[in-house]
Image (cartoon, helix red, strand yellow):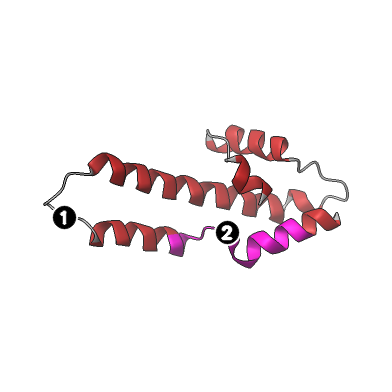
């Protein structure tokens, strides 16, 4: 495994991954902040959709680090990761999520 890949994996698994617990926490926060006094269904839906997308992207990166990253010379450029996410999940990861 390349040193850069190892460092990226360390950073990601060290706290930058978006776990199911974080997704649940964000969902419960949305439910707790619900109010009949204001109408913000589109914003709430956008926040929940963004949370689900972050979770799915995080799971995809976790899969990549668990399988492909151990190849002696893996092609883990941001473009490759983005294309893999698009092929498997139906959407591409945001560049800042991949490069971090």
Q: Nearer the viewer, residue 89 or 54?
A: 54
Residue 9 falls inside the magenta stretch: yes
Q: Residue at x 64, y 67 (%)?
A: 14
Residue 31 falls inside the magenta stretch: no
Nearest-to-viewer mark from 1 and 2: 1
Relative image position of residue 54 (x, y in whole percent): 50, 49
User: Image quarter for residue 10?
Assistant: bottom right
Q: Is residue 92 above or below residue 36?
A: above
Q: Is residue 64 left or right of residue 19?
A: right
Q: Is residue 24 left or right of residue 91?
A: left
Q: Is residue 10 left or right of residue 33?
A: right
Query: Principal SS element in the magenta part?
Result: helix
Q: Residue at x 76, y 43 (%)?
A: 76
* Contact (Cβ within 8 Å) of mark 1 with mark 2: no
* Residue under pointer 1: 35
Q: Quadrant of the N terminus?
A: bottom right
Q: Residue at x 85, y 58 (%)?
A: 3
User: Image quarter for residue 26?
Assistant: bottom left
Mark 1 vs mark 2, CA separation in Å: 30 Å
Relative image position of residue 23 (x, y in whole percent): 42, 58
* Residue under pointer 2: 17
Relative image position of residue 90 (x, y in whole percent): 53, 33
Q: Magenta residues?
A: 7-22
Identify the element where label 1 is drawn. loop
Q: Residue at x 60, y 38 (%)?
A: 85
Identify the element where label 2 is drawn. loop
Residue most extreme to the left: 37
Residue 80 numbered mark, or none: none
The number of discs equals 2
Relative image position of residue 45 (x, y in whole percent): 31, 43
Q: Nearer the viewer, residue 77 or 61?
A: 77
């Amino acid at each position: 495994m390349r040193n850069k890949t190892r460092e990226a994996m360390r950073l990601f698994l060290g706290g930058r991954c978006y776990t199911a617990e974080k997704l649940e926490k964000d969902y419960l926060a949305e439910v707790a902040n619900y109010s009949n006094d204001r109408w913000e269904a589109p914003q709430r839906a956008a926040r929940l959709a963004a949370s689900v997308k972050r979770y799915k992207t995080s799971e995809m990166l976790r899969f990549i680090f668990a399988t492909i990253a151990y190849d002696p010379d893996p092609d883990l450029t941001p473009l490759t990761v983005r294309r893999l996410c698009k092929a498997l999940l139906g959407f591409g990861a945001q560049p800042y999520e991949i490069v971090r």
